[in-house]
Image (cartoon, rainbow, N blue to C red):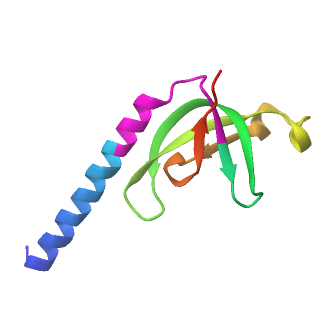
């Protein structure tokens, strides 16, 4: 490999390693059934829900990311929504979120 190709390869490997470490650390911190709040910027509001599971999936910019399944509470305008309608997959690394004390 040429010098530029080696540098690009090293940068790519660092990115993948950081993503894997972040994903692994995240997976150990949230457990099924834990309560969270996620800030939805387009609605400028926090929404509460329950963490269900996570998976590794391709990221938009290449590499991988951990997507987390949150089932939001049936409240407000969503009071009569089904569980399927309240279930969203997020990359929580890209979101503002926190645990809710139970």
Horizontal and vertical percent for residue 13?
A: 22, 58
Locate the C terminus and report the quarter of the image it occupies: top right
Seen from the viewer's position, the closer of residues 91 and 95 is 95
x, y percentage for residue 94? 52, 54
- Total numbered badges shown on the rendered structure: 0
Q: Picture quarter containing residue 88?
A: top right
Q: Position of residue 18 (x, y in %)?
A: 30, 51
> Which residue is nearer to you in this view: 61 or 32?
32
- Horizontal placement of 1 versus 86: left or right? left
Give the image quarter of residue 27. top left
Give yes or no for residue 55 being in the magenta stretch: no
Q: Where 15 sits versus 74, above or below?
A: below
Q: Residue at x 23, y 57 (%)?
A: 14
Write the residue at 15% across / 71% down.
7
Residue 70 is situated, as x and y percent measured from the top left of the image, at 64, 36
Q: Quadrant of the N terminus?
A: bottom left
Q: Is residue 90 above or below residue 100?
A: below
Give whichever of 4, 26 is nearer the camera: 26
Residue at x 42% of width, y 37% of height: 26
Establish if 90 lies above or below 43.
Answer: above
Q: Is residue 30 left or right of residue 78?
A: left
Question: Along the horizontal axis of the image, is 22 left or right of 7?
Answer: right
Nearest the viewer among 91 and 57 is 91
Q: Which residue is situated farthest in the front direction here?
A: 101
Residues in magenta, as a range = 22-37
């Amino acid at each position: 490999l040429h010098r530029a190709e080696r540098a690009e390869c090293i940068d790519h490997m660092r990115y993948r390693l950081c993503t894997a470490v972040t994903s692994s650390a995240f997976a150990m911190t949230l457990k099924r059934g834990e309560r969270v709040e996620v800030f939805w910027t387009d609605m400028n509001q926090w929404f509460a829900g329950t963490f269900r599971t996570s998976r590794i999936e391709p990221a938009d910019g290449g590499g991988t990311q951990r997507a987390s399944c949150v089932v939001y509470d049936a409240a407000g305008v969503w009071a009569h929504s089904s569980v399927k309608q309240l279930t969203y997959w997020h990359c929580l690394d890209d979101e503002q979120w926190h645990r809710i004390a139970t």
